[in-house]
Image (spheres, helix red, strand yellow):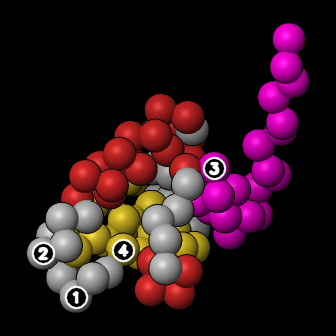
Amino acid sequence: MTEATAKRRLEIEFCTVCRFQGRAFWLARELFDQRPDLADEFVLIPSSGGVFVVRYDGETVFDYAETGRFPEPKEVREAVLAAAGRPPTPPRHAH
């Protein structure tokens, strides 16, 4: 696959034994609803061992094991944009 045709891939790997799938599904939907242009592929990967890892093009952008908590959509979105070399989401102004 050439660089021009390479797909941007966002993966959420989650532990089914721990029942993390609800959080994974919710996070994927929030990210897609907020920024459908964030990635070409949004992929959910069932796993085990207490894992909840978010990767962008193979690079880990959030790991539950390192933080001890689940990510907020905004921090994943901004980490993915940074990993892709894209500018951060502009702040919204209150009306």
Seen from the viewer's position, the closer of residues 93 and 8 is: 93
Q: Residues within 10 Å of mark 2 (few under 14, many from 20)?
A: few
**Badge 1 element:** loop
> Which residue shows up at 22% across the image and 59% down it?
21
Asked whether residue 82 is drawn in magenta, I would say yes
Are discs 2 and 3 less than 8 Å apart at CB? no
Circle 3 residue? 74
Query: What label sits on residue 17 in the rendered view?
Result: 2
- The span shown in magenta is 74-95
Mark carried by residue 52: 4
Look at discs 2 and 3 and give the one toward the viewer: 2
**Amino acid of disc 1:** Gly
Residue under pointer 1: 49
Q: Is residue 80 left or right of residue 92?
A: left
Point out residue 63 in the picture as x, y percentages from the top left corner. 49, 79
**Residue 34 occupies quadrant:** top right
* Cα gap from disc 4 to disc 3, whole angstroms: 17 Å
